[in-house]
Image (spheres, helix red, strand yellow):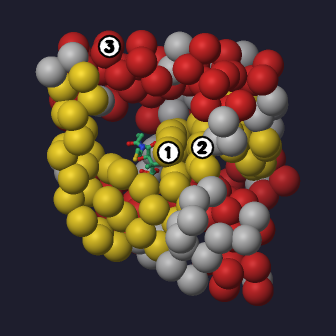
Amino acid sequence: MTPPFAASTTASLPASAFGVAGIELVPAADVDLATIAALAERIWWQVYPPIIGAAQVHYMLGRGYALPSLRSAREAGTRFSLLYLGPYPAGFSAWQGGVDAAFIDKLYLLPALHGCGLGRWLIEATCRQIAIAGHDVARLRVNRHNRAAIRAYGRAGFSIIASDCLPIGGGYVMDDYIMERTALNALLLD
Ligand SMILES: CC(C)(COP(=O)(O)OP(=O)(O)OC[C@H]1O[C@@H](n2cnc3c(N)ncnc32)[C@H](O)[C@@H]1OP(=O)(O)O)[C@@H](O)C(=O)NCCC(=O)NCCS
């Protein structure tokens, strides 16, 4: 289902304008992976070409978001969730548990909905899932030139703990910061 949102009608609205009851982060079933792939296709082509170039977007989408890749990640324990605004899928997140921290592998919101607090809501809801699963620390990778996402994570309590340039095949690298948020258990006290 395609959300009928346009940047001009949503960009300045606070998340609360949608009504708390209308925003949900719902664990994804196998059947939802096609929706996640479709959202990724829309979001990546709007956000990443200026950051990593079109060729790398094409390569990484093909590698990470083909249905067999998503399915095997899910079967290996990655927990995918869809962000719904009412009936409309508007973003998604995915994370895995680890020994000393959980790793947030994916966190994406449709660009028409950036800048109104929904990204922050998605980060908090994902961290809450992680805390409920018993992890007190979350880590993630974010491209060093993805300033909007770095700012959003910083506002949500993540700090940069390292830089890492990871070869991913095809002659490409992921030139990332590693960011970490601690004390997630505090989210369960609210
Ligand atoms: C990461 C991501 C989910 C964050 O979402 P976001 O909408 O940018 O983040 P926020 O909800 O924190 O909002 C960002 C801006 O809106 C402003 N804002 C937040 N709540 C607001 C409100 N109620 N009213 C008006 N403005 C608001 C913030 O002050 C911030 O402004 P700034 O960037 O000028 O400082 C989003 O940028 C995204 O999906 N990016 C593409 C995918 C991506 O890069 N993912 C990360 C991969 S590691």
Q: Residue at x 64, y 41 (%)?
A: 78
- Relative image position of residue 68 (x, y in whole percent): 60, 14
Look at the numbered disc 1 and give the secondary structure of its residue.
Answer: strand
- Numbered tag placed on residue 105 in the rendering: 1
Q: Quadrant of the image for the C terminus?
A: bottom right
Q: From the viewer's perspective, tell me whether residue 156 is left or right of residue 24.
A: left
Mark 2 against mark 1, which lies toward the viewer? 1
Q: Residue at x 73, y 71 (%)?
A: 134
- Cα separation between marks 1 and 3: 18 Å
Q: From the viewer's perspective, tell me whether residue 104 is left or right of residue 77.
A: left
Per the image, the residue denoted by label 2 is 93
Q: Is residue 101 above or below residue 175?
A: below
Task: First in sequence, mark 2 or 1: give its number.
Answer: 2
- Relative image position of residue 60 (x, y in whole percent): 35, 22
Q: Quadrant of the image for the N terminus?
A: top right
Q: Residue at x 51, y 79 (%)?
A: 182
